[in-house]
Image (tube, rainbow, N blue to C red):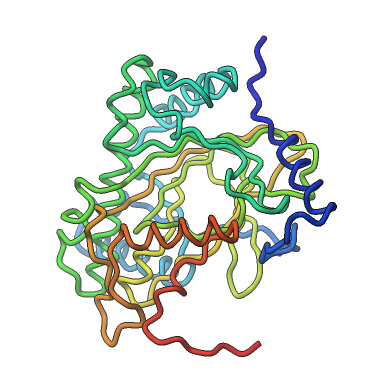
Amino acid sequence: MAEIEPPLEERYNELKKEELNGRRTIEADEEVIEECEEEIELPVIDLGQLKKGNLEREKCKKEIVEAAMNWGFFQVINHGVAEKVLNAMINEQKKVFNQPFVNKSLSTNFLNLPSTHYRWGNPVAISSSQISWSEAFHIPVLEVSTSHHHITLRTTMEGVVKKLGSLAEKISEILGQSLGIKSNYFKERCEKGKSSFRMNRYPPCPIASQVYGLIPHTDTDYLTILYQPQISGLQLKKSAKWFPVKPNPRALLLNIGDLFQVVSNDIFRSLKHRVVASEGVERYSFAYFYCPSDDVIIESWLKPSIYKHFSYKEYRQQIEKDVEKTGNKVGLSRFFLHNIALPH
């Protein structure tokens, strides 16, 4: 059987050797691995209430807004995506990831998609601590229908993406209305935008105490929707502490992205999160990233604004520059309207 695993350990050892030989300067901004608090159960919101009377509907909207304000992360049930559909998506991506590594990484015909859509290990890592012990297919939503060589994968993915896109639009509208934003604001910006779908696999890791499954980061979008079936390695950072998130196989997990933080003028916060590596367990998940078109101007709805105006393209380009230089995303602090000196 051909080797399915990406050469994660080889890449880690290469970087470690360069560090020991003094050929690389370690600029990682976090030690691996910071201590964690006790596991938390995020707010669970029943979206079935939105289909009931006005009282139940408004209560549900209030719960969504409060969870987004207090946590930046929350879970939803009765979300409109059948459990059998979620399970089918996980099964389809297992088939994809179980293909030989050489096919996944080099073949432009593998899913009838560019080979650049397959990612592993964090290709821009400049230190061993920045390796992500994972592999992923990151597919623009507008390209999902082109994977015609894999019919069941394509049809399953199309169904999931359509449902998650509608859910992202609905939740964004509810959060936006709490800020006084018109109901079609996000739909107009994202309908033909850069939204994407990502299939994740986290292989067992023999050096789990030294690397992450996915390095600490915030999401570069308005809203992210994640499905993780039973075993979670997800942790979020709140009040300078890391908290493991208790998985709920019935729920979809939503979190605020950088762009919504700007639009809300920091009322909703894009929290840093990470996935820890596991020594003996293989894990799968998938995520939908709700994003606008390149030319959409990102600006605070509430005034006075904390942030400069910038286009989505400009923001992504700045992230790419920072990652290329340091191996890490800098993010929104680049776009503060006033540079405020923070205490050391």
Q: Where is residue 143, by image quadrant? A: top left
Q: Where is the C terminus found, in terms of image quarters?
A: bottom right
Instruction: Please provide percent x and percent y for residue 56.
Output: 27, 61
* Left or right: 26 as drawn, with respect to 113: right
Outermost residue, front side: 23
Q: Residue at x 45, y 34 (%)?
A: 116
Instruction: Please provide percent x and percent y for residue 73.
Output: 47, 60
Q: Residue at x 76, y 54 (%)?
A: 23
Q: Where is the N terminus found, in terms of image quarters?
A: top right
Q: Residue at x 20, y 74 (%)?
A: 180
The residue lying toward the viewer, choosing from 50 and 263, is 263
The residue lying toward the viewer, choosing from 124 and 265, is 124
Instruction: Please provide percent x and percent y for residue 62.
Output: 32, 68
Q: Where is residue 98, by image quadrant? A: top right
The residue lying toward the viewer, choosing from 216 and 51, is 216
* Left or right: 175 as drawn, with respect to 267: left
Outermost residue, top side: 1
Up/down of 286 relative to 129, above or below: above
Q: How many marks?
A: 0
Q: Where is residue 277, by image quadrant? A: top right
Up/down of 61 relative to 335, above or below: above
Q: Residue at x 73, y 56 (%)?
A: 24
Instruction: Please provide percent x and percent y for residue 32.
Output: 75, 58
The residue lying toward the viewer, choosing from 65 and 193, is 193
